[in-house]
Image (tube, rainbow, N blue to C red):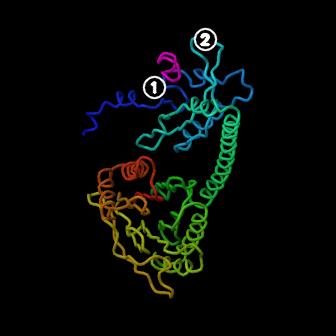
C-alpha cells in the first residue's frame, strides 16, 4: 500500500495503548484517545502544556519520585536519540474532577525518539501501560503476604533503576574520555593555501563517539605538497581508537620522509605487525603536488579515493590496490599510481562505512557515492560533505564508522 494512502493521524488515535507525543522540551504535541481516557484528561488540558504542569508529583507523598525519574528518562532520550524502557513507576494522578484528591497509580513507561532525516530528535514518543489494577489484584483477597511480595517487587524495581542510572553515569564519563581522545588524535579541518579540506567523522551508533576510522592531513616538505590519508581499524570504542591513534601517528611520520604514498604505507604495514589490534586494518594515502597538478596514491585494502573533475566526470583512483596493512609478514614494495588534475578538481577520501551496506554489493555503494558527488560537484567542500553524508548514511545513524575528507584542488 502506498504510504500516502495511510491516515497516520487516525492510526495514532486508534492505537490500543496509551501514547503521547512530546517535544524535546517536554511539551505535549499530541496524545491519543486511550492516553486521554486513562489519564482522565481532555485534549485541551494536555496539548500545548508542559508534561509536569499536567501531571505533577503528588505533594502528599514525600517519597514521590515519578516526576524526577520520568524527566531523567525523557531528557536522556532527547540527548542520546536512543530508546529507554523505564522500571515500574508509582506516579499518582490528581482527580481532574476533585482537585486535591490524588489516586495511587502504577505505570510501566517506554520512551523513544522520533528522528528527522539528519538524525536529530524532533519528538519523543511516550508510551505508558497502567498496571495499577494488577498491583491491587496481587494484594487482593489472599491478604497481606501477596501485598508484601508486591511491595518487595516494587522496591527491587526502584533499586534496579538506581543501578541503571549509575551505569548511565559511568557511560557518560567514559564518553567524555572518548571525546577528549578523539579531539587529541584527529586533526581539525585544514586550510592549505587556498586549498580547503573539509573533514567529517561519524562513529557507528552506540560507539561512544569514537571509533577505529581515522584521517590525516600533512604538509609535505619540498614544494607546495600535501598528503591526505584515511584508514580503518576493525572494531569500535576506546580500544579501536587507541590502535587508530598509533597507526595514524605512524603514517603521519612516515609520510613526511617517504618519497611517495606507496613507501609510506609500506612502512606503516611493517609497524602494524607489532601493534595488537591492527589485524586487517586498511588505509589509503595520497600525495598531492599543487605545483605540478598531480596526485600519487596507494591503497592497502581500502576503498579507492575519488577524483571529481571540474569539466565533468567522477574517477575512482583504483590503479594501486594492495592487501591490508598486516597481510604481508615480509617487506614488499606496495604499488603506487598517479594521475593529473586541473584547477578546481576535488579529491574525496572516505572509509567503508560510507559505502558498505549489509547484504549489498559494495559496487552499489560506490555507484551511489559517485552519483551524489557528481550531482553536487559545484558545492564547496563543506556543503559537499554534508550532502554526501545526508544522502549515503541511514537517518538513524550507521552501524559502521565513517570518516570523510574532501579537498578542493
Taking the spot 29% from the left edge, 51% from the top edge, the residue there is 375
Q: Which of marks 1 and 2 is nearer the N terminus?
A: 1
Q: Do the residues labelled 1 and 2 touch (CB within 8 Å)?
A: no
Across and down, in percent, residue 43 comes to 47, 18
| Residue situated in front as seen by the camera: 262 or 328 | 328
Taking the spot 56% from the left edge, 57% from the top edge, the residue there is 210
| Residue situated in front as seen by the camera: 87 or 296 | 87
Label disc, if present, on residue 98 of the rendered structure: 2
Across and down, in percent, residue 291 comes to 41, 67
User: In this image, 194 relative to 257: left or right?
Assistant: left
For the view shown, which residue lies furthest in the bottom direction? 330
Is residue 79 among what the camera can see? yes
Q: Name the residue under label 1.
A: 34
Are there few (<14), some (14-19), or many (20+) residues within 10 Å of tag 2? few
Q: In this view, does 223 lie above or below 381?
A: below
Across and down, in percent, residue 355 comes to 37, 60
**Numbered range of the magenta stretch:** 37-48
In the structure shown, which secondary structural element does the residue marked by tag 1 occupy? helix
Is residue 226 among what the camera can see? no
Which quadrant of the rendered structure holds the C terminus? bottom left
Label disc, if present, on residue 310 of the rendered structure: none
Amino acid at each position: 500500500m502506498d504510504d500516502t494512502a495511510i491516515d497516520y493521524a487516525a492510526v495514532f488515535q486508534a492505537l490500543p495503548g496509551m501514547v503521547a507525543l512530546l517535544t524535546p522540551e517536554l511539551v505535549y504535541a499530541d496524545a491519543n484517545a486511550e492516553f486521554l481516557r486513562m489519564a482522565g484528561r481532555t485534549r485541551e488540558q494536555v496539548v500545548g502544556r508542559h508534561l509536569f504542569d499536567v501531571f505533577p508529583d503528588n505533594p502528599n507523598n514525600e517519597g514521590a519520585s515519578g516526576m524526577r525519574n520520568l524527566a531523567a528518562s525523557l531528557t536522556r532520550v532527547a540527548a542520546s536519540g536512543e530508546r529507554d524502557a523505564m522500571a515500574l513507576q508509582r506516579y499518582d494522578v490528581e482527580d481532574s474532577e476533585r482537585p486535591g484528591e490524588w489516586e495511587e497509580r502504577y505505570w510501566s513507561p517506554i520512551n523513544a525518539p522520533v528522528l528527522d532525516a539528519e538524525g536529530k530528535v524532533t519528538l519523543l514518543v511516550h508510551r505508558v501501560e497502567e498496571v495499577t489494577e494488577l498491583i491491587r489484584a496481587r494484594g487482593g483477597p489472599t491478604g497481606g503476604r501477596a501485598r508484601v511480595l508486591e511491595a518487595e517487587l516494587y522496591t527491587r524495581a526502584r533499586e534496579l533503576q538506581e543501578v541503571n542510572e549509575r551505569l548511565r553515569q559511568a557511560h557518560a564519563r567514559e564518553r567524555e574520555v572518548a571525546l577528549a581522545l578523539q579531539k587529541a588524535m584527529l586533526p581539525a579541518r585544514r586550510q592549505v593555501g587556498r586549498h580547503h579540506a573539509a573533514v567529517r567523522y561519524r562513529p557507528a551508533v552506540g560507539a561512544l563517539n569514537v571509533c577505529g576510522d581515522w584521517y590525516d592531513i600533512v604538509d609535505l616538505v619540498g614544494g607546495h605538497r600535501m598528503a591526505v590519508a584515511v584508514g580503518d581499524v576493525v572494531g569500535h570504542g576506546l580500544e579501536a581508537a587507541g590502535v587508530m591513534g598509533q597507526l595514524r601517528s605512524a603514517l603521519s611520520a612516515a609520510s613526511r620522509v617517504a618519497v611517495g604514498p606507496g613507501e609510506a604505507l609500506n612502512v606503516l604495514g611493517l609497524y602494524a605487525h607489532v601493534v595488537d589490534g591492527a589485524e586487517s586494518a586498511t588505509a589509503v594515502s595520497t600525495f598531492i603536488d599543487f605545483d605540478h597538478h598531480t596526485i600519487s596514491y596507494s591503497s592497502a585494502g581500502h576503498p579507492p579515493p575519488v577524483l571529481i573533475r571540474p569539466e565533468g566526470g567522477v574517477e575512482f583512483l583504483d590503479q594501486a590496490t594492495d592487501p591490508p596493512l598486516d597481510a604481508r609478514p615480509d617487506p614488499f614494495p606496495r604499488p603506487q599510481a598517479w594521475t593529473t588534475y586541473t584547477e578546481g578538481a576535488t579529491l574525496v577520501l572516505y572509509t567503508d562505512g560510507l559505502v558498505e551496506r549489509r547484504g549489498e554489493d559494495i559496487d552499489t555503494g560506490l555507484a551511489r557515492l559517485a552519483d551524489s558527488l557528481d550531482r553536487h560537484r559545484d558545492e564547496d567542500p563543506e556543503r559537499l560533505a554534508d550532502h554526501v553524508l545526508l544522502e549515503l548514511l541511514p537517518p538513524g545513524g550507521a552501524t559502521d564508522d565513517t570518516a570523510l575528507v574532501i579537498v578542493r584542488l
